[in-house]
Image (cartoon, rainbow, N blue to C red):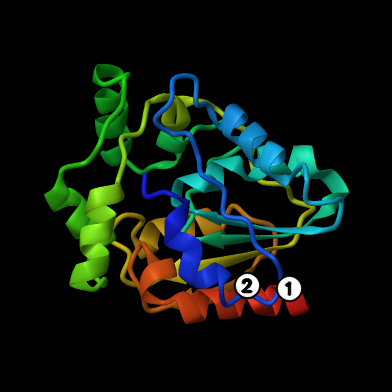
Amino acid sequence: GTGAWVWDRVTEKLSLPALPVEMPLGEEGATPQWCADVVMKALSDRGDGSIILVLHSWAGVLSGLLADRLGSRLSHVVYLSAVIPRENGSFVDALPVPQRWILRHLCKGNQQGMRPTDAMIEREYCNDLTADDSQLVLERFTAQRAEPLLTRVPGPSAEVPSTYITLSRDQSVPPSWQRRYLRRLTNPARAAADAGHLAMLSQADEVARVINDVAGS
């Protein structure tokens, strides 16, 4: 994956303290449940105030898990072109055919981890980035194990208010997929950005504006 560093430009523009969390997606046993525990550990010294959760791409699978763990502390979830499985589904289950079949096959043959080719990363993640940002993404992109992709999770909470930000130029989670995932939420607010998959790099001002609007509502 890309790593928490991609959020730096957004966090410096937010009106409230923010904590990007590094996900151990390349480590053995890195199920979504474990990743949710990593988030909770990172929050353990941040007091007991309310939390706005921002989930991008794969991290959409953590929504229901973190809603269960955070309880009444969770005030809002912002989804940024996030993949949202149905109840008791996995990331792979949430993909359309044939992508679902292809990724499941790749996972079974690469249990120790997979990293897309540089050409694929450039096409799906960097289509609206500067040359410098694209190079950073390529240099820092790490392999991801099968567990985060294949493990089943609870669906998103119907009780937590949410906002879904669609990205019109996303080549990794295309707009048609985003609309499918948005429909799995209960009365979400909607926002949009003319950006590719890593909008936190190419459109940091707009992503921060949406989060700040949620924080101020």
Judging from the image, what secondary structure is the residue with disc 2 in? helix
Residue 67 spot, x, y in % from top left = 74, 44
Q: Quadrant of the N terminus?
A: top left
Q: Does 85 appear above or below 181?
A: above
Residue 131 spot, x, y in % from top left = 18, 70
Residue 167 spot, x, y in % from top left = 41, 69
Judging from the image, what secondary structure is the residue with disc 1 in? helix
The front one of 175 and 50 is 50
Q: Does 215 appear above or below 115?
A: below
According to the image, label 2 marks what residue?
A: 211
Label 2 amino acid? Ile
Query: Residue 96 appears in which quarter of the rendering?
Result: top left
Question: On the picture, is 1 further left or further right than 21?
Answer: left
Q: Does 177 appear above or below 144?
A: below
Is disc 2 surrounded by few (<14), some (14 to 19) or many (20+) residues within 10 Å? many
Q: Quadrant of the C terminus?
A: bottom right
For image coordinates 12% across by 51% down, the residue present is 119
Label 1 amino acid? Ala
Q: Are marks 1 and 2 in contact (CB under 8 Å)?
A: yes
Query: Residue 190 appears in which quarter of the rendering?
Result: bottom right
Work out which residue is located at the far front of the displayed protein and give it.
45
Q: CA distance from mark 1 to mark 2?
A: 6 Å
Q: How many marks?
A: 2
For image coordinates 76% across by 55% down, the residue present is 160
Which mark is drawn over residue 215? 1
Residue 24 spot, x, y in % from top left = 48, 34
Is disc 1 surrounded by few (<14), some (14 to 19) or many (20+) residues within 10 Å? some
